[in-house]
Image (cartoon, rainbow, N blue to C red):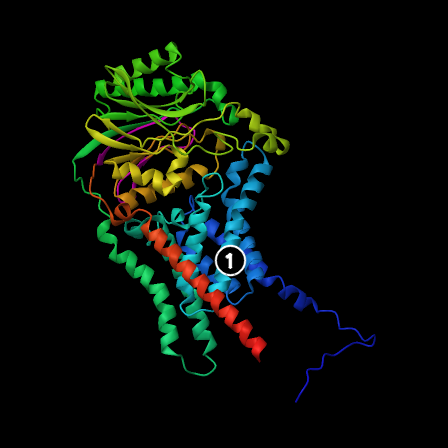
Amino acid sequence: MSATITPVDASGTDPAPTPGARLLRFVRPGAALLSGFLLYLSFPPRPLWWLAPPAFALLGWVLRGRRLRAGFGLGYLAGLGFLLPLLVWTGEEVGAGPWLALAALEALFVAAAGLGIAAVSRLPWWPVLAAAVWILAEAARARVPFGGFPWGKIAFGQADGVFLPLAAVGGTPVLGFAVALCGFGLYETYRRIRAHRATGTVPRGPVAVAAASVLLPVAGALAALPLVDDSAEDGTATVAAVQGNVPRLGLDFNAQRRAVLDNHVARTRELAADVKAGRAPQPDFVLWPENSSDIDPYANADAADVIDGAVRAIGVPTVIGAVVAPETGKLRNTLIEWDPERGPVATYDKRHVQPFGEYIPMRSLVRIFNSNVDRVSRDFGAGTKVGVFDLAGTKVGLATCYEAAFDWAVRDTVTHGAQLITVPSNNATFGRTEMTYQQLAMSRVRAVEHSRSVVVPVTSGVSAVIRPDGEIVAQTKMFTPDVLVEEVPLRSSLTPATRMGTLPEALLVALAAAGLGWSAVRSVRARRGGRTE
């Protein structure tokens, strides 16, 4: 029998840790932060999508074999490293407080993922289970609190990546799962080879399993390429997207309401003049952005008159983004189909209004921390009907700004017959930040996910026209008045992702739950075995 002897100094106490030992204590926390920051760097406007798998590989090294409490803490650091820089735009006009609070809250979901990944990391095929746990956390983050906040889904950083075709297979959950699996598989392959290098032999089974975790997502993406199709199944439509711009940046853009409306009227009339002169093709319909008329045209005859004049000038149905203010009740963020002969003929009310932006939950409590909540003096209410307009024979699905981040809000326009999708947005409150590029990437992923052209008219950010394969064929510059006129393919077939809806996500969540349950059972058995001995 032998005993471990710990040396002591002359005073009989344990010696102080060396500087090197103290430094090693910070290696994993630092690596956790770095893994999160690499995830941030993989998002637009940088074309560095390929950084996401190495980020997950590093996160796998950080979390594998850790205790649950350590997994939670290290996961939280990774979440901060990822979400603090990704969401900095949320504090552009309201200060650092709301930005820091949002990032701190959302990082808790990454922390929960870290705990779960640590729990399943001792199981066979742990990279598969760990990737499923990540998707479980994303699914929760997309739903709670206040209806969820899916901004920063890993899938939204892959608009330029090789994994993008998987969006057509199973939507953002399958795309994000493939990226995470590839990253965790990279680390496991490295770990297996390194662990057995000293013996001069490499166990083929475990290494093959690890390598499969890397190769299968890539092979799956290649196999899914035939689903990425931009052919014109239902002919084409010529669409115009108007970016009127705002006179100045910031939260007070609403105080410039008439100037913003006049800008969009002017751009539309200029387009009409160009069409008449043969300098531009005649569009089949025109799309204005969200909040292009913050003056309620139903209540203000002068706003209705200038809109009607512009629509008559261009001579085709035009979608107007308006704030509708009923005499009682909540405001409505509304898209109005304006016909050149009949005026307003259909409306769509935004169904997922933005908490703390369009309405203030717990207003009296939040006011204690930030008085900017009173800028939203009257809350917006949510609509209930799916938005699909028939514009000159084309079924156009409507997802207003923030809604593009939610799988259901885009998918159900397609299942209701949309041949083309539009995402009218207003980015004026976020200045020249990366927000508009992050949102544009979402629309590119949605284009491939549902095999639809997507048109993004924006007041002041980056407006764009996207083909069903995710390619941007035209875009504007930020804070520049412009009009995009493009012929785009129309499609009506449904991808597997559109047909299955939430089923792929549900299966991945069930896989994660099974892995966590398996880990819990093994842990209980291990503790009982220890007591028996």
Picture mark count: 1
- Residue at 35 percent across and 41 percent down: it is 408
- Residue at 40 percent across and 13 percent down: it is 299
Q: Is residue 247 visible?
A: yes
Q: Is residue 273 above or below residue 77?
A: above
Q: In which quarter of the view is residue 307 placed? A: top left
Q: Indicate the position of residue 472 as horizontal and vertical percent values.
A: 31, 40
In this rendering, position of residue 189 left or right of residue 499: right
- The C terminus appears in which quarter of the rendering? bottom right
Q: Is residue 51 visible?
A: no
> Which range is magenta?
465-489
Q: Is residue 194 above or below residue 98?
A: below
Name the amino acid, label 1.
Gly
Q: Of residues 404 and 417, which is closer to you in this image?
A: 417
- Residue receiving disc 1: 114
Q: Residue furthest right?
A: 11
Q: Is residue 30 above or below residue 431?
A: below
- Residue at 38 percent across and 53 percent down: it is 176
Q: Indicate the position of residue 428 as horizontal and vertical percent values.
A: 46, 29
Q: Indicate the position of residue 55 as horizontal and vertical percent values.
A: 46, 57
- Residue at 19 percent across and 28 percent down: it is 393
Q: Does residue 89 belong to the magenta stretch?
A: no
Q: Of residues 214 and 102, which is closer to you in this image?
A: 102
